[in-house]
Image: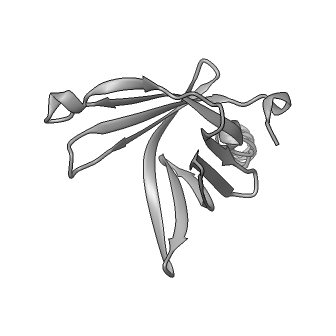
Amino acid sequence: MKKFQLLIVTFSLILILGCGKDDSADSFVGTWVAETIKVSGCADEGRNGSEDVPCDDSCYRLELMGDGNYTFQQDFTVESGFWVLDGKLKLCSDQEGETICDEYIALLAQGGLELSSDSTSSGCVTTYIFMKEDPADTIQ
């Protein structure tokens, strides 16, 4: 009888822990403003470097919405689509009737979001460093 009770308790714990809500994607939801762009690992070392991104008239702004949609403002251009967190952060958009996804290694650390992407054509790794935008800072 004790083995049966132990089995039921174990099964219940697996069900309770296994069916909990996945909060990892929730941590990414919000509006993020790029502060720095770093390029590294380039075959042409002259392309490596870091650049601060001012947010005056135009910004690099990424909004990841809780419904799975996103907008990405790069200067005065805005791209929109849907996002998926599946080991990597995938930003997918419709381009001429075809769904194209850009994949990024995504890290949340010290209140910031780092998105890294490597380009096989240039051999470079581009890392965008975003900070979460305070809703009071949003310029309309």
Q: Pick the residue in front: 55 or 134.
A: 55
Q: Can residue 18 be seen in this view?
A: no
Name the residue rendered at 69%, 57% in the picture.
68
* Colour scheme shown: one colour
Residue 92 at what x, y percent from top left?
53, 62
Q: Pick the residue in front: 8 or 113.
A: 113
Q: Residue at the left extreme? A: 43
Name the residue rendered at 78%, 28% in the picture.
134
Name the residue rendered at 50%, 54% in the picture.
90
Q: Residue at the right extreme? A: 136
* Quadrant in which the N terminus appears: top right
Vertical comparison of 82 with 52: above or below: below
Give left or right: position of 43 versus 77. left
Number of numbered discs visible in the structure rendering: 0
Q: Residue at the bottom extreme? A: 97
Residue 71 at what x, y percent from top left?
65, 54
Asked where in the image residue 126 lies, by quadrant, the reply is top left
* Quadrant in which the C terminus appears: top right
Name the residue rendered at 66%, 37% in the picture.
57
Give left or right: position of 31 versus 109. right
Vertical comparison of 55 with 76: above or below: above
Q: Pick the residue in front: 20 or 127.
A: 127
Q: Is residue 133 visible?
A: yes
Vertical comparison of 106 with 132: above or below: below
Residue 13 at what x, y percent from top left?
72, 40
Residue 36 at what x, y percent from top left?
49, 26
Q: Pick the residue in front: 4 or 113.
A: 113
Q: Residue at the top extreme? A: 110
Vertical comparison of 10 with 45: above or below: below
